[in-house]
Amino acid sequence: LAKTTQPISMDSYEGQEVNITCSHNNIATNDYITWYQQFPSQGPRFIIQGYKTKVTNEVASLFIPADRKSSTLSLPRVSLSDTAVYYCLVGSPYNQGGKLIFGQGTELSVKP
Amino acid sequence: GAVVSQHPSRVICKSGTSVKIECRSLDFQATTMFWYRQFPKQSLMLMATSNEGSKATYEQGVEKDKFLINHASLTLSTLTVTSAHPEDSSFYICSARVVSGGRNEQFFGPGTRLTVL
């Protein structure tokens, strides 16, 4: 399974755009890139998933370059409630049963 | 998105007792569920993959006789921590996998806080 590397922590202020980059140099052809958000004492919550180029939904955008060795989660205009740990994972339902291995994640702190 | 529930949300037990945690997919069927453990200030650690109708696959270092997993139906997987000890105190989280058109999405339960006295 591809290993991911993310910054351990990031600080931001309310209203700013936050970009969290994840590197996954060993990503396999069938792997998708998925981002999750986790608040303390809660299960992770799915944010967004993509395979290549750009994906956008109501909460975030995901940018994936052509070589797919990295990806960037973009959170527009963050608020205090976006303070959480964000995990980047890569995996495929066709590889090792679709299991996901969590890295250390990025602890985002949004300040007023 | 798909909803996954866990029961109980928190449990306190005495050392040496066994504790069962249930994971249910409420609005979809899941042939594969996963069990994770998370210690304070750490990431989630995958314990095992639970497949409906077959034996679970455990990650290296996870004792299968201590953490019993049963995936008896397409909507229910259970994790039983046998002869629990204080070092088993942790946050246990399950997830259910949805496969659609090659996408690999996992939906997570809210977690179960286990405290062993």
Image (cartoon, grey):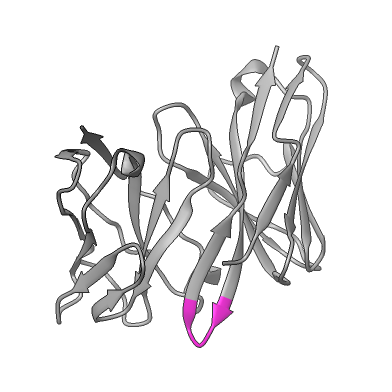
- Is residue A112 one of those drawn in magenta? no
Extent of the magenta region = B99-103
Please tell me whether residue A32 is drawn above or below residue A104 in the rendered image: below
The quadrant the N terminus of chain A occupies is bottom left
Left or right for B40, reference A112: right
Relative depth, front residue between B17 and A17: A17
**Residue A104 visible in image:** no
Residue B69 at x, y percent in the picture? 75, 49
Which residue ends up furthest to the bottom in the rendered image?
Answer: B101
Residue B18 at x, y percent in the picture? 82, 28
Relative depth, front residue between B31 and B87: B31
The quadrant the C terminus of chain A occupies is top left
Q: Quadrant of residue A106?
A: top left
Q: Quadrant of residue B110?
A: top right
- Is residue B100 one of those drawn in magenta? yes
Q: Residue at x 55, y 39 (%)?
A: B37
Please tell me whether residue A93 is drawn above or below residue A87 in the rendered image: below
Q: Main secondary structure of the magenta part?
A: strand
Relative depth, front residue between A54 and B34: A54
Which residue ends up furthest to the top in the rendered image?
Answer: B117
Please tell me whether residue B96 is drawn above or below residue A77 in the rendered image: below
Residue B86 at x, y percent in the picture? 64, 16
Left or right for B18, reference B113: right
Tell how many labels.
0
Q: Residue at x 15, y 82 (%)?
A: A66
Left or right for A21, reference B111: left
